[in-house]
Amino acid sequence: MHIEPGVVDGAKMVFAYGTAAAAAGYSVKLIASDLAQHNILSFAARSVLATVGVFVFFELLPHFAVGVSEVHFILGTTLFLLLGAAPSALGLALGLLVQGAFFAPSDLPMYFVNVTTLLVPLFAISALAQRIIPQDRAYVDLAYADVLKLSVAYQGGVVAWVAFWAFYGQGFGADNLNAVWTFGAAYMLVVLIESLADLAVLAGAKALRGGSIRGLFTHRLYHAG
């Protein structure tokens, strides 16, 4: 979902700096909460896994330009369910930074725009999960309907932020409206694929329920809240 350079520029970038700073602040809160349940080694391992995963999702999986941005298989819900909100947030931010710094430097001027677009929907599904997933249910036992709700919320949040940045930066001209609509329509198709991917990954994790690598996952994956 890399928003193209120039969509937001000049003085308007100040708002992006502010939203990214707010996202960073909230991420610190999530990290503190995560460390209350997991040790530092578990958090570090999950953060590394998230960072590597995000880099793979952005750089190696199929992606293509549509309208105002690019369509990627971010798998944000998958990261959240397996690794937890805090490592996922850190992984999204670092993975995006590594990808931009070493493979797509033209994207770096839009880093704060893009990182806000990725993180705020993650925070939203973290809050949504607390509301719609019963506290006595582990993530590996989620039904398709629960996973679909989280995927729709995450991808819908990404689309909403991309639309916001496009309108904020370029206004409501016919060409911009069409570019946003085209991007949104293409991106929401990703929901169906990512929901199935989430279920497949959870099924694999469930098969490893008694394995020795459980420390690489968030506590909630196998335990009630």
Image (tube, rainbow, N blue to C red):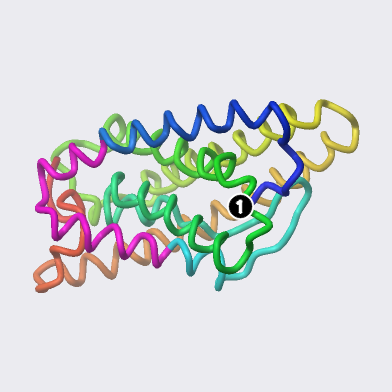
Q: Is residue 223 above or below residue 164?
A: below
Q: Is residue 179 left or right of residue 64?
A: right
Q: Which residues are magenta?
A: 30-53
Q: Secondary structure at mark 1?
A: helix
Residue 171 percent location from the top left of the image? 81, 26
How many numbered callouts? 1
Depth check: give the residue in front, 225 or 165.
165
Q: Looking at the image, which residue sits at the far right?
A: 174
| Residue beneath the point at 38% across and 56% down | 78
Residue 2 percent location from the top left of the image? 63, 51
Depth check: give the residue in front, 108 or 169.
108
Residue 196 found in image quarter: bottom left
Q: Is residue 93 above or below residue 149?
A: below
Residue 40 percent location from the top left of the image? 13, 54
Depth check: give the residue in front, 92 or 221.
92
Q: Is residue 12 above or below residue 200?
A: above
| Residue beneath the point at 50% across and 65% down | 57
Residue 101 percent location from the top left of the image? 55, 61
Q: Which amino acid does the dot numbered 1 rest on? A: Leu
Binning the other alpha carbons within 10 Å of mark 1 as few (below 14), some (14 to 19) or many (20 upward) gives some
Q: Quadrant of the C terminus?
A: top left
Q: Is residue 96 left or right of residue 31?
A: right
| Residue beneath the point at 53% across and 60% down | 193
Depth check: give the residue in front, 183 or 35.
35
SS majority, magenta: helix
- Give yes or no for residue 45 being in the magenta stretch: yes
Q: What residue did someone put label 1 on?
A: 108
